[in-house]
Amino acid sequence: MVHQAENLFAKRVLLPALIAAAVSVPASGGPNIILFLADDMGLGDVGIYDPQSTIPTPTMDQMAAEGLRLTDAHSPASVCTPTRYAILTGRYPFRAGMDDTVLRSAYDPPLLDHRQTVAGMLRRAGYSTAAFGKWHLGLGWSSPDGDVARPGVGTSQFSTRDVDFDRPIHDGPLQHGFDRFFGLGSSINHGPYSFIDDNHIAEKPSRIREETRVNGAVFRQGWIAPGWDDTAQGARVSEQALEFISRSVASSEPFFVCYAASANHFPHSPPSTLAGQPIRGRGGPDDDNPPRNDMVVENDVILRLLLERLDDPDLDGDPSDSIASETLVIVTSDNGADVGFYSPIRDKKGSIYEGGHRVPFLARWPGHIEPGRVSNAALSLVDLYATFAALAGEEPATDTAIDSHNLLPVLLGQTSPGWSRGSMLQQQNGLDKTFAVRDGPWKLIVEEGRPRELYRLDNDLKEEVDLLDAKPNHAVRLLEIYRKLRSSVAPTH
């Protein structure tokens, strides 16, 4: 459950101190919040984490210089859908039955239920809320006869003919706390290949596109709009996000932006340029995949545009209206890198080893987060809910955010010596019920039908020495923690 003592401290002691120290803050008392969630970006993709990388990420590197870099941050799962669920709900993905499924289309039934999302909580606190980019949590479409659309009707599992694009989406981001949405219903390689604008399709698809292979990967079968351009997603989505920020500032509304980039998920189709900046050909040869690396560059350029908009929201060239000091910006990823290997850790996306879920995490809030600080505090992206609630002076509902911890003291450098988040859970790819439970430096891997594995990460970050037989007491202790977590609340779907 969200730690009550931490939340009370944040609301009664920490938050008023923050407000008093701030140059200026939104009327709600908490900062604006931008969460930039890259897709499949690993530690080795960001220069400040891997100086050997050929991928230029000057904006992310500068963010680290101006704020905080975490070295032990984790996605709750090593693939996208479960992580997105956990971020929005503050609940581990298995609680929604995602220990054995990953959504395969934009037509799968929605995973979010009646519980208030982090966007709904912030809206209750007076924030204007928006999601841009990849959704991939299921959408409620209507069929031609007015019933609920079903995936896989007359098509592969990735599409359907049982859909009426003239009808509004009846269960999507706007039903789960967001005032604004512009982006994709699912992954970059799933249809419909048309943007969703709030709860309507932006351009009605006219035909079904058959599977198309690009750079060794597949765009799945799906409906496609006449004007669709595979390379233009970042440009179109970022334009909408920038407009939302300017409108929110003009109306004096504090805002929450969840920018879920579709890059750098495969197939890798980078644009030639974005906002006048060259993209294609800039990413370098890392992992023999230049197009994929170019999409990391695309994310870095979009991040720069967002930060520049904070400096000049009305675009008049006068920085006196800058809201940078009023805005917390976090950059992270939904899981580890999808290609290649980052040598200090083992494996990549889809794995229960560190390469599957140890992710970049940068945070900037001028005047509050000390510039250039590096922390090895362990955290999970499931903790963003409780952390944002503390910033907004809100208390999550009792059935919400039960796995989320308030980590604002970590961001602000106010933890005491020996501080620890406590245990946390990661799951693998959602298909084989493989989990890892972490407590301090110890990590136990539990997979049905296979021997368990035990590692001590402070001595063996690459997970090369299995200590299961040598340290049985630690294995027993972690297994007990795992079983309590897994049995604490029944899945809701």
Image (cartoon, rainbow, N blue to C red):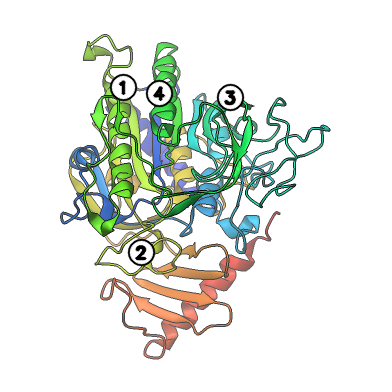
Q: Nearer the viewer, mark 3 or mark 4?
A: 3
How many residues crowd mark 2 within 10 Å: few (<14), some (14–19), many (20+)? many
Q: Distance between the residues labelled 3 and 2?
A: 38 Å
Between discs 1 and 3, the one toward the N terminus: 3
Quarter holding the N terminus?
Answer: bottom right
Q: Distance between the residues labelled 2 and 1?
A: 33 Å
How many residues crowd mark 4 within 10 Å: few (<14), some (14–19), many (20+)? some
Give the image location of residue 62, x and y in percent: 19, 38
Residue under pointer 2 = 355
Q: Distance between the residues labelled 1 and 3?
A: 27 Å
Q: What element carries label 1?
A: helix
Tell me what residue is drawn at x 48 percent, y 82 percent.
Answer: 452
Residue 47 visible in the current orientation: yes
Between discs 2 and 1, the one toward the N terminus: 1
Between discs 3 and 2, the one toward the N terminus: 3
Q: Nearer the viewer, mark 1 or mark 3?
A: 3
Give the image location of residue 347, x and y in percent: 36, 68
Kind of residue at disc 4: Glu
Give the image location of residue 474, x and y in percent: 42, 81
Q: Which of marks 1 and 4 is in front?
A: 4
Q: Nearer the viewer, residue 176 or 302?
A: 302
Instruction: Please determine whether, in this image, residue 413 is positioned above or below residue 389.
Output: below
Between discs 1 and 4, the one toward the N terminus: 4
CB-based contact (under 8 Å), mark 2 and mark 1? no
Tell me what residue is drawn at x 33 percent, y 28 percent.
Answer: 306
Q: Which mark is residue 239?
A: 4
Q: Is mark 3 on a helix, strand or loop?
A: loop
Kind of residue at disc 1: Arg
Residue under pointer 1 = 309
Q: Which mark is residue 216?
A: none
